[in-house]
Amino acid sequence: MHDPAKVGLDGSEFTITPADTILVTGANGFVGSRVVRTLLSYGFERVRCLMRTANISEFREKGLKWENVEIVEGNLLSRDTCKAVTDGASVIYHLAAGVETSYAGCVLNSAVATRNLLDAAASEPKMKRFVSISSIAVYSNEKIPRGGLFDEACEVDARLVDRNEPYTYGKAKQDEIVLDYGKRANLPYVIVRPSVVFGPGKSKITDRIGTATFGVFLHLGGSNRIPLTYVDNCAEAIVLAGLRRGIDGQVFNVFDDDLPKSREFLKLYKRNVRRFLSVPVPYTVWYCFCFLWEWYSRWSEGQLPPVLNRRVCSVYWKGNTYSNEKAKELLGWNPRVSMDEALKKYFAYVRETADHR
């Protein structure tokens, strides 16, 4: 169990006590399961987990009090389910999201589901904090020069449809609904926008480093810093966003320290996991390619979907610097797992799982 004193935490600064009920939606997901583990390690005694498929064995861990976990199987599209799971809850960690490939699916399972949950939360008298998990992908870096600072002051992209990213569009709509309930219903909320979450359990190399879409790995990241956060570090930042007093209405981005450059990451991956052919593609060349793809998509009236376009190219491969100072200052958060250790654990997982395919 974590000792709060060792991580700069004081129970008197928490919004709740260990005996209060906490709800975690999407609790069996990659990040959600770690949020549950972190809450248990902090000593919380009543953690309610909502998931579509109830299977606690997926995220059990020795040394934690799983008798303090209540499993609820259900769907946030059901208002009855939302009312039942929020009953008596003091803090809600909302990690469930729409991951469909269509706009309708992502809006339904991110925005509409969040609205249903917020309706129930707003009428819960014990509610102290609603923590909504978004993504740094909702930002635009159009007005930030290459190498410029990317932080919470960045503008949310107002032209997400042009990026052809249903998941990101759904997350942005979710954020809008949370902000509206915060203002209209006076609901205490915090929005957390994780960066690229990695670690054991997720083997894919992030597209911010490159893509194998065309049969060969195109290295697009160049010398960019990759905005990574190790899954356990990210989970702890999310947990603290629900516990710290005095941060209602804040937005936090989550980046780890010592972010590697894309070239460094790829070199380490090849050395520790497997070697493969990669072709470096300069940003300007890829930007021009995306322009041509975008133009042909319009010319062909959508015969070629606009999955590659200049706005996507800018957001993912333009290259920026990243700050986690706000999370450190207001949450008292520091990444427990160093980047070196996180990369070792990730590479070991990918290597071991690849050996068994």
Image (spheres, helix red, strand yellow):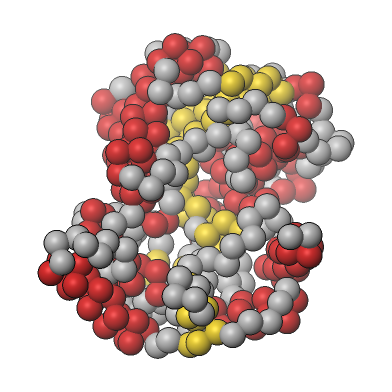
**Which of the image's four quarters has the N terminus?**
top right
Q: Residue at x 42, y 56 (%)?
A: 136
With respect to residue 72, does 178 lie above or below? below
Q: Could you tell me if residue 188 is visible in this image?
A: yes
Q: Is residue 13 above or below residue 270?
A: above
Relative to 254, residue 71 above or below = above
Q: Say if 127 sits above or below 339 in the image.
A: above
Left or right, residue 212 beside residue 354: left
Residue 41: image quadrant is top right
Quarter of the figure that contains the C terminus: bottom right
Q: Residue at x 15, y 66 (%)?
A: 300
Residue 66: percent from left, percent from top:
78, 27
* Residue under the image location 59 percent in, 21 percent down: 73
Residue 11, quarter of the rendered image: top right
Residue 50 in the image: state x and y as whole percent: 57, 25
Q: Going by the image, does 62 lie left or right of 280?
A: right
Image quadrant assignment for residue 29: top right
Q: Can you give x and y, in whole percent of width and height, for residue 207 in the image? A: 48, 68
Residue 56 image point, x, y percent: 72, 29
Residue at the far right: name it: 63
Q: Residue at x 33, y 54 (%)?
A: 165
Q: Nearer the viewer, residue 352 or 178?
A: 352
